[in-house]
Amino acid sequence: MPISSIPSTPYGEIRPHWREWLDALERWEVPAHMPRPRLYQPAGDREAVRKRVRAVDGLRASLEKAAQAACEGDLPEPTDDPRPITPWMGRATACADWWLVSGDERAAVRAWEIAQKVMVWPRWVTDEHLPLTIDLRSGAALHALAVVLDRLDDWLSEADRQRLINAIIERGVKPFVEISDAHSEWWTYSLHNWRSVITGQIGIAALSAMHSVPLDLLKRALTHSLIGVLTVLDQGDVDGGWFEGMGYWRYGIGEAVQFIDVLSRVSGGKIDLFAHPYLRKTGDFGLYNTWPDGRVFHWGDCGERVNASALMARLAKAARRADWQAYVRAFPALPSLETLFWEDPDLEAAPPESLPRVKHFRGNETAVLRSGWGKDDLIVGIKAGQTVANHSHLDIGSFVLVAGGHSLVDDGGHWPYGHALGFFDLGDAASSGRRWDFPGLASECHSTILVDGQGQRYGPEHDGVIVAANDGPGFAFATVDATRAYPQLSRFVRYFLLVRPDTLVVVDDLAAPDPRRFGWRAILPYPTERVAWPVWVARVPDTALSLTIRCLTPLPEEGLIAEQTQMDVVYPATSALAEPRTSMLTISQLIRSRERKFVVAMRVGREEPVEPEVSVEHVYRALRVTAQTPAGKRTWSIMWGEPGVQLLT
């Protein structure tokens, strides 16, 4: 996503709606005494932590196991390579956690040993982020030191405590303020997860040492943290969506919420960003984009396993949303000590059945259509939006189809970072970046349209918009205008018609200045066979679940090409060798043309494959779709050039 212009003043543009929080920070007086631990629990109240831990089944054992593992092995000796110390940052926190909960001397000793190594390690910034002097790893290091300081306060000697404080100030707070004042590194004016994570974690580190940081320096650091977090929250869309996808939402917004929670607690509620409008809505993003089996709508660089229970718990607590609390109960996860007090156990959970079954996240431009809220119901996830959004793929107009705990039509999945091969080389207006040589990031591994085998282009002028999304009696629909994503097309409008309970019809209206071969592609993760022209059946192994796909337009009589392919790729990812595999079905017309309509119907079979009972009729400037439903035959009309789908009978 394009970064904003470099600010000309230390704090940049101050937006009017930020003023109440910035003024509250200016008025706030650092309390003369606030005992540690104070960041993530009632100040100085160790027993409250221990009581809460005992109340969560399995948490104490989990904390003990993590600490025991961290106590094993030899600590690395400092080198200019930050990788050896990186895993030990989390282990320092694990040992500090266990000391706070149990008073185990061995854990305290180990936490301090690790902290000493972290403090003297020459460089925290990873190789791929050079020449930056602060990056995400730096934020993690400073957060680990802050946690050790906060939890081991009564165990540390005065000299050791001061060493930790000095490290936090000299390697964290001071350079953070200097870089932020000058905007000398790009993350200081970025709009995505980097900014909220770095500013949030260093803001927490500053609060851990607040009585020792000069007041002016402390206020400047917290002001930069506050502005950084507010800037990121302002990027969320009007419905609570997040442009980086579910994984980076949990990370970037989750770290922002962690800072907001600590700042509210330490300030006695005087600085409370939970009133930000985005935080009052964004729990819907987690709720709608999580499937009944816990997997998520995983577009962009995100994986499909994202548990956001802690974040959802804190959002539900702040907004008093019983349906968000239902997510927490449906997808339980052990909290960390940082999130131990995030859930309000007295907040009743209300199942989401009363919520709309269609959700369009406007601005983010994704949508979810559901046949219902049951665990076996059919769900369709639809992706449009900006190709220049951070971590985006060239996937405009793509979709996934989920039923019975399985993705029957899928996305190409998470491809591990390959920094050395140009994974984040986006290119520019003059040339395509190496990122788009990775098929999983380009259009090849997404369920959308290819044109003569080619996909979409990257750039601010290449995007897609969901122009309509709505619910109706027995059906739901959404329409995507993806024309701008393809420089080789003059029109690509995709209509989705969900006919409850088990049928999806996808209609594509395509045009190009010159004759083209249009390829309708679906990513099919399960074994698929053609049973007739033009019908394919995908079966989920060891289950009775299936998906039957019928191409209604074009017909075999017009000439069709069908390709079932498996793409195997191997490349050196940043951490290990990656071997992604993608299986796909592509349907194309035999003879190139300037215009083409595709109509493909899909039906979920729960006992055996069932063909879609769908027919189409081309009428003047419109397409009529007729489907058999539990209530009898229904007919819908799609007017070419119009955004909606109209129920006729």
Image (cartoon, rainbow, N blue to C red):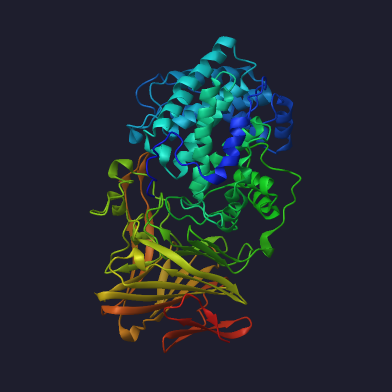
Instruction: Give whichever of 10, 577 is nearer the camera.
Output: 10
Q: Is any atom of residue 210 visible in this view?
A: yes
Residue located at (31% from left, 60% from top): 457
Q: Position of residue 60 (x, y in %)?
A: 67, 32
In the depicted structure, whether residue 96 falls above or below residue 584: above
Residue located at (56% from left, 46% from top): 17
Q: Position of residue 209 (x, y in %)?
A: 57, 22
Q: Position of residue 26 (x, y in %)?
A: 59, 31
Judged from this view, the residue extending furthest toward the bottom is 620
Q: Is any atom of residue 70 visible in this view?
A: no
The part of the image, by quadrant, that contains residue 47 is top right
Quadrant of the image containing the C terminus: bottom right
Q: Tell me: 118 left or right of 147.
A: left
Q: Tell me: 366 left or right of 7.
A: right
Instruction: Give whichever of 585, 478 is nearer the camera.
Output: 478
In the depicted structure, whether residue 267 falls above or below residue 563: above
In the depicted structure, whether residue 476 falls above or below residue 206: below
The part of the image, by quadrant, that contains residue 57 is top right
Q: How many marks?
A: 0
Instruction: Give whichever of 491, 53 is nearer the camera.
Output: 491
Instruction: Give whichever of 500, 136 is nearer the camera.
Output: 136
Q: Tell me: 159 left or right of 449.
A: right
Residue located at (41% from left, 33% from top): 135
Q: Position of residue 420 (x, y in %)?
A: 29, 40
